[in-house]
Image: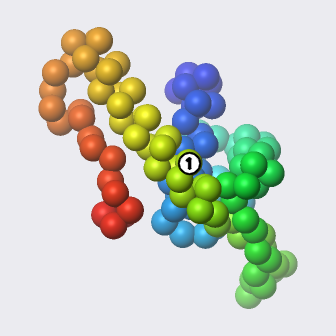
Amino acid sequence: MNVQFKKGILDLCVLSLLSRRACYGYEIVHEISETMEISEGTIYPLLRRLKKDGHLETEIRESTGGPARKYYHLTGSGRDLEQSLREEWFSLVRQVNLFLGDTDETHEHEPLNNNER
């Protein structure tokens, strides 16, 4: 996948994952890596930035199989940002598909509301 495309959507991917459940850093990398190739070196600066901007909070949780882990979860601001980015993403996909001449309705996905996730 084009690196610039990926950079532009990683915030949305991380926020979307964290809208479903709190995760620790390596878990975020693992979950997203099942769909697209990413590295820890990409995710941790993004997590720090989102936390600094007030979209994430962290908590330390003890682990049964090793050291305690830092879990990330969304703040109210993070939930708002995730929803806004989600809406922008689906609008952009529709616009690009129209420009490319793709009129197949199966490619158009409406954003899920929070109750459908």
In this rendering, is residue 10 above or below 100? Answer: below
Q: Quadrant of residue 94?
A: top left
In the picture provided, is 6 more to the left or to the right than 55?
left
Say whether residue 55 is visible: yes
Q: Quadrant of residue 7?
A: top right
- Give how far across and how far down residue 97 sits, in percent: 28, 20
- Give how far across and how far down residue 79 sits, in percent: 54, 57
- Residue at the limit of the structure toward the bottom, as seen here: 64
- Give how far across and how far down residue 59 sits, in percent: 76, 74
In this rendering, is residue 85 above or below 71? Answer: above
Q: Observer-nearest residue: 28 or 96?
A: 96
Q: Residue at x 59, y 40 (%)?
A: 10
Q: Residue at x 36, y 36 (%)?
A: 90
Q: Residue at x 50, y 41 (%)?
A: 85
Say whether residue 35 is visible: no
Q: Which residue is mark 1?
A: 81
Say which quadrant the C terminus sits in: bottom left
Q: Quadrant of residue 5?
A: top right
Q: Observer-nearest residue: 88 or 63?
A: 88
- Give how far across and how far down residue 64 sits, in percent: 74, 87
In this rendering, is residue 101 above or below 23? Answer: above
In the picture provided, is 34 more to the left or to the right than 58?
left
Image label count: 1
